Amino acid sequence: MLTVEDVVTTYGAVRALDGVSMTVEPSTITAVLGANGAGKTTLLRTVNGLVRPRAGRISYEGRDLLRTHVDEVVRMGIAHVPEGRGVITELTVDENLRLGALWRRNRTELQQSLAEMYELFPPLAERRNKPADTLSGGERQMLAIARALMSRPRLLLLDEPSLGLAPRITAQIMGTLRRLRDEQSLTVVLVEQNARSALSVSDQAIVLNLGRVVVSGPAVELAADEKLRHAYLGF
Amino acid sequence: MFRFLNLTLNGLTNGMIYAAVALALVMIWRATRIVNFAQGGMLMFTTFIAWDLAQVHHANYWVALVVAVVAGILIGGVAERVLVRPVENGPPLNAVIVTLGLLIFLQALAGMIWGNSQAHSYPPAFRFIGYKVGDRTLRFSPNDLFIVLSVLVVVIALYVLFQRTSLGLQMRATAFNPEVAGLLGVRVGRLLTLGWALAAGLGALVGVLVAGTSSGYVTPVGPFDALLIYGFTAAVIGGLDSPGGAVVGGVVLGLILSYADSYISNFIQTMYALVVLIAVLMIRPKGIFSRTSERRV
Amino acid sequence: MADELESPAGALIAPTSASSTDRFGVLSRSTLLRHTLAALVGFGVLWLLITSFSDYRNSSWIAPIAFTVCAAAGLTVLVGLSGQISLGHGAFMLVGAYTLALVQEHWTTSHGNLAMIGLLAAAAAGAALFGALVGVAAARLRGPYLAGATLALALGLPTLPSYEKLSGKLGGNAGLFVSSPNPPNGMDLYRWQSVICCASAVVVLWVLANVSRSRVGRSFRAVRDDEIAASLCGLSVPRVQVLAFVLSAAGAGVAGGLLAMIDLTAGPQAFPLSLSFGLLAAVVFGGLGSLAGAIYGSILITLLPLWSQDITDALSVHSHKVSSNMPLMVYGIVLTVAMLAVPNGIQGLLRSLRLTLAPGRRR
């Protein structure tokens, strides 16, 4: 579904991504793991066109993503939940959700998606007309994911959804991701520092270190590899 | 008592005008965090265009009004694209100086085209003569009613635009968080231009309304500078960030100026605005109606 | 002299070149001495100019440029060094002019030159006092809020003399009479006015140059660059900001006093909004924060109105409408273009030119 080949992305003299390749299969969850500064966020930003790579190819369902503008990427069915959640706190929950479906013109579909999101994330339904700054951290993360889902994406790019959340909330969110994969065949690329919880829901995983892929393979195998866990994953 | 009633009505009419200017400033402030000091100059210029049509070429009042508003929209959009875009993310000082430069430029251009020496009168939309209550005449004429209603209609239309439409939602999202809005597929640049264009169009309407009041006239410098200050003061009363606050601020300022004018002296109008401005800024630097905190960096 | 007063704080560390350190020893070590010498030389040059120029040149070039420099130098220190904006510096000039007129009317008995120095000092003090008042308010305001408030001030203050309760004391719209200075034997009035204006400008520049190279000037820059960092260094940010306003207003006060002395009146019409805009255009044109830039800018905004008729005639546009609006149009263009294309003004251009021509020199 998504193929990344030998991508090199630089910030000035720093090579944030140094020849990264990965393949994401449809309706799977792929975890991108690694320490701070490994290049995980840069990988996501390169995929959706916020950062242009120096070299390499990225294609999505056979289409070249490198020639596509950010808002076009959204239209192609790729949604991005940025780190730190990117919820617009001054707007209400409902308005945030509506922003997620900007390019969809059909009103009834819009209402239907809204209803689905409120069903999927009940805490949001209770606060639908409250400004988003009244939400807790976990609720904001739910809102950010729900907003991304509003565009009916087929590929969801999630950047550190567990950041600053209580383990129970993290588990809830991971559970929701699994449900979306199983019920709606959603494909997810999940960037995480919290390797343990990410691996618990993932099918595949890659581990980045200093801009290079050090390991990739089925999540179960990575989770079982004790040496790898100690060296890169910290559990 | 009758005098007080008259002053209140007069203050209300003027207040609606200040409210509209304030609203234009607030729209731009919300979108780009810039106070548009050129607002007075832009609406002066479009009013001159309307005046030229109505008085020199004898066009219909409404045609002139529409042309002025369209001209305003164009000037606003072009100004944002050409002048403001490069300084939008720079130090606030640069933006202030650029908008001031545009103000001065427009004043000079208007002076070159239409001259500074004359105060041109502008035809009112409706009668100047006030409504009669018994045998006394109110200081509130059909023309004043027209002013109040037009501004009200525009305020309501803008409210609907911002709160009830997808375009308005996108504009608000852009104002609050351009980066996230862009990530969601909002065309941020276009919306900023649109914000400026709408604000300038609103300003153009105000210009024609003001010029058509009994005390109004069109010159390159003078009354429109004061109008900018009144609008700014009204916007600051409302907190610069709040459209509703701007409207309330405009009416409050209109009333204060009207009473002070009559009970203290009518020579120092701008001083009252200055006093109100300083007082508000000292007591509530973020404005009286402002809820949102300062923008995070 | 003022050339070294660039705004970037880095310039403070190595203001003079290595070679001149060797050549001038003491001079490069003592800023005060260098500035004083430059002031004396500058005044000497001006004296030669004044005595060789005609009355017309003196009255319409030298004197107006010199008093504009006083105001523009103050403004450039305020905006360029302390980072606060004033769109209404004409208001401080107005206060200076009225202070001079009132002091002269009520307290002076002689018309000697000592009295005149006292009057100008009073004008500076009056404006400085008013500047302190405005500064206290300004210290709580930022960017556009301050800009709007000072604009309101410049628009509102000139209406005050018309206020019924004050018009008796302030002479209403016509203003107050100011008596002319007495030229010494053998010198005519215009030359003498030019001498006074130039001397004042040199003194103002000398004071501001020294202040901005001192601890005070550094604190201005610190506050401008980062208020939080400055306050963490133990600076009282509001105090620094008020001080900048006081200094700046004092310069404008001197300018206003000189203007009143030349016009023989202190009246509201002499201080329209366009005066304040012109001052801002002057400092932006010259380069914000540069005293030398304030001089170029003052020359521009003084000569422009004089030449605009010739310029329009040369373009064969024989229209009074066009020529009378020419200066204003140039101010507008200067302000926008400078901010978009040449943010450091003429002084910045000169500096980069010098760096290109003599790459070996340290800044």
Image (tube, helix red, strand yellow):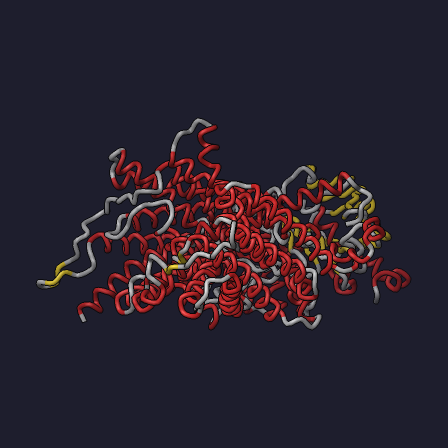
The answer to which of B240 and C297 lies nearer the viewer is C297
Q: x, y percentage for residue C159?
A: 36, 60
Residue at figure coordinates x 51%, y 49% from the top left? C187
- Quarter of the picture holding the C terminus of chain A: bottom right
**In the rendered image of this protein, does residue C90 appear above or below residue C323?**
below
Q: Quadrant of residue B260?
A: bottom left
Residue A203 visible in the displayed image: no
Q: x, y percentage for residue C141?
A: 53, 65
The answer to which of A86 and B125 lies nearer the viewer is B125
Residue C267 visible in the displayed image: yes
Q: How many marks?
A: 0
Q: Quadrant of residue B64?
A: top left
Apparent side of residue B284 relative to residue C176 in the rendered image (left or right) = right
State the residue lying farthest toward the right.
Answer: A227
Q: x, y percentage for residue B199?
A: 42, 49
Residue at figure coordinates x 69%, y 68% from the top left? A164
State the residue lying farthest toward the left.
Answer: B135
**In the rendered image of this protein, does residue C314 appear above or below residue C199?**
above
Apparent side of residue C327 relative to residue B213 in the rendered image (left or right) = right
